[in-house]
Image: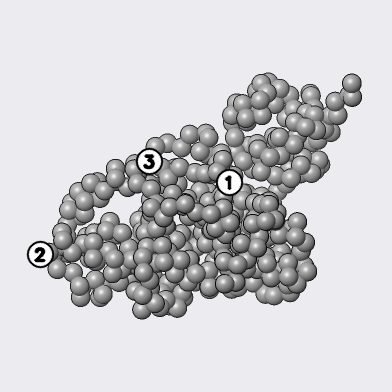
Amino acid sequence: MAKTVEALITPEVLKWGRERRIRLSIEYAAEKLNVKPARLRAWETGTEKPTFAQLKKIAKLYKTHISVFYLPEPPTNFTLVADYRKLPESLTTDEEQAYKLNANIIEAYERREALLEFYELLEEPPFEVTLELSEDDTPEHAAQEISNFLQLDRELLHQTDDQYAALKFWKRTVEARGILVCQTSANSHLSIDLETVRGFCIVQKPFPVIIINPKDSPYGRIFTIIHELVHIALGKSIVQPMGDKEDSPQDWSQTEVFCNDVAGAVLVPADELSEIVNLHTLATDLPQISKHFRASSEVIMRRLATLAYISREDYQEYRNSLLDKYLDSSPTGGFVPYHNKLLNTSGEHFARTAFTAYHEQKITLADLSAVFSRCDTKHLPKIESVIFA
């Protein structure tokens, strides 16, 4: 019988992969790898070596290439820095969900790096994202800055037929300004519960990234896009690098409130709201007002409270009545073909650039398949037909 081949890896890198790249406890990682924690600990200390077959399973779990574990020392250029939004009063994230979230963050980082590489291969300069905000700004002023930066065409927004068309409008509007808008992984085993996270962002420029959860409602995803855009403009993430304690939890909370207020002001301009709101008929008018702004009724009520049309108590009561229904709801768009899932995960701008690089013979068909979650090549013509229709 053939002798088992040991993988002569660097133990410190193996430990780095678990603790710093994917952020898993040794117990959880061992369970997923179907070994005892003592065995994984022995691999990480170098007293034992995994087999090459075991190393392949580790690389898949840790979302990295197998060659990384042969580096002489842990990489220093990888840090998970991302803002992510939870639903209010959400449950504490369990380790399974934490793994899926970190895996999605890694995918987002890798997608951004791939896009930068495409631009280099195509010899094109990346987009310059010039939007900058300060928390000293008023939400109304910050909202106007965002609208100007996006060159927002509200007339075109009002012409959208439904929530999904409005979502597509916002995604394309933001991507046109050099910010990737993607959804969480197309791989169902990395699907994130809505109770865990609604979205997150990577603030680095060029090509900051906004990730939204497809389990959210279309209006919920629209709000997340604008909320995360504010974070990008601030250059500030809620989840800090390990060891970075500059921002206190109180600072984080203030930042979240600011981002929510600005997002509401972008979606529901004060002057436009004042023209159509009638407090005497608000209960019956609310669905139509929501449709007019292409924003959820909760956002409308929050804006009414912010602008002192209604009390904060009235808003909070309304919000509480919605929360349980919101958590139990799911998008009503029906079945989504797999090639559309792949496109939504990558974002249209990324997909268009990847196909351009392929057609200009800068990357191979295998490379193209790899950046779309290593999909079967049969899906690629379908993706292409959507983005170049």
Q: Are marks 1 and 2 in contact (CB under 8 Å)?
A: no
Q: Which amino acid does label 2 sit on?
A: His
Rendering quarter of residue 188: top right
Instruction: Please give the residue where the numbered disc 2 appears in the rendered image.
Output: 280
Q: Distance between the residues labelled 1 and 3?
A: 24 Å
Task: Assess disc 2: are there few (<14), some (14-19) or many (≥20) residues with their C-alpha within 10 Å of its C-alpha.
Answer: few
Instruction: Give percent across and percent down for residue 385.
Output: 60, 67
Instruction: Please give the residue where the numbered disc 3 appears in the rendered image.
Output: 90
Residue 239 marker: none
Secondary structure of the residue carrying numbered label 1: loop
Residue toward you, 187 or 73: 187
Q: Earlier in the sequence, mark 1 or mark 2?
A: 1
Secondary structure of the residue carrying numbered label 3: loop
Secondary structure of the residue carrying numbered label 2: helix
Instruction: Give percent across and percent down for residue 296.
Output: 31, 59
Relative horizontal placement of residue 5, taking residue 277 as reference (left or right) = right
Q: Is residue 104 above or below residue 344?
A: above
Instruction: Give percent across and percent down for residue 22.
Output: 62, 41
